Amino acid sequence: VALNLLHRACAQSVQVNVISYGAACTACERSGAWRSTLELLQELFDASMEPNCFIYTSAISACGRACRWELSLALFAEMPEKFIDPDTVAYNACASALDQAFEWELALALLFKMQWQ
């Protein structure tokens, strides 16, 4: 529903912003629509908007819940490249995705990295 509302708003020339996309990403994450979360992230870039840590964390969580830990890790690694500092919630989301996939060594390495950030 949230994704549909966002696209309808865009189609009707309603001004949408990063917060609008963040709400849609969270809705997609909670409903298990990980692909839609990634599409929203791409739409942000296409619209020359800059995603924030909250949006990245939603995408990381959505991918993790879908057992797509590689995507979660790639998104996490992409954050500094986009000048976004991962916060504790982003670290936790990525570590959780790794833990669910039994990639405990990577999860531990990530948590050690967080300790030194």
Image (spheres, grey):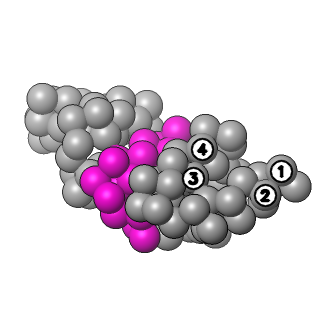
Q: Could you tell me if the residues under marks 3 and 1 are in contact, i.e. CB atoms within 8 Å?
A: no
In this rendered view, identify the residue nearer to me: 94 or 24: 94
- Residue 81 placement: quadrant: bottom right
Residue denoted by label 4: 92
Residue count near mark 4 (Cα–Cα under 10 Å), binned few <14, some 14–19, many ≥20:
some
- Calculate the distance from the C-alpha at mark 3 to the C-alpha at mark 4: 5 Å
Helix, strand or loop at disc 2? helix
Residue range in magenta is: 50-71
Image location of residue 11, percent across then percent down: 13, 41
Residue denoted by label 3: 95
- Calculate the distance from the C-alpha at mark 3 to the C-alpha at mark 2: 11 Å
* Majority secondary structure in the magenta region: helix
Helix, strand or loop at disc 4? helix
Q: Could you tell me if the residues under marks 3 and 4 are in contact, i.e. CB atoms within 8 Å?
A: yes
Residue 112 bears which disc, if any?
A: 2
- Calculate the distance from the C-alpha at mark 3 to the C-alpha at mark 1: 13 Å
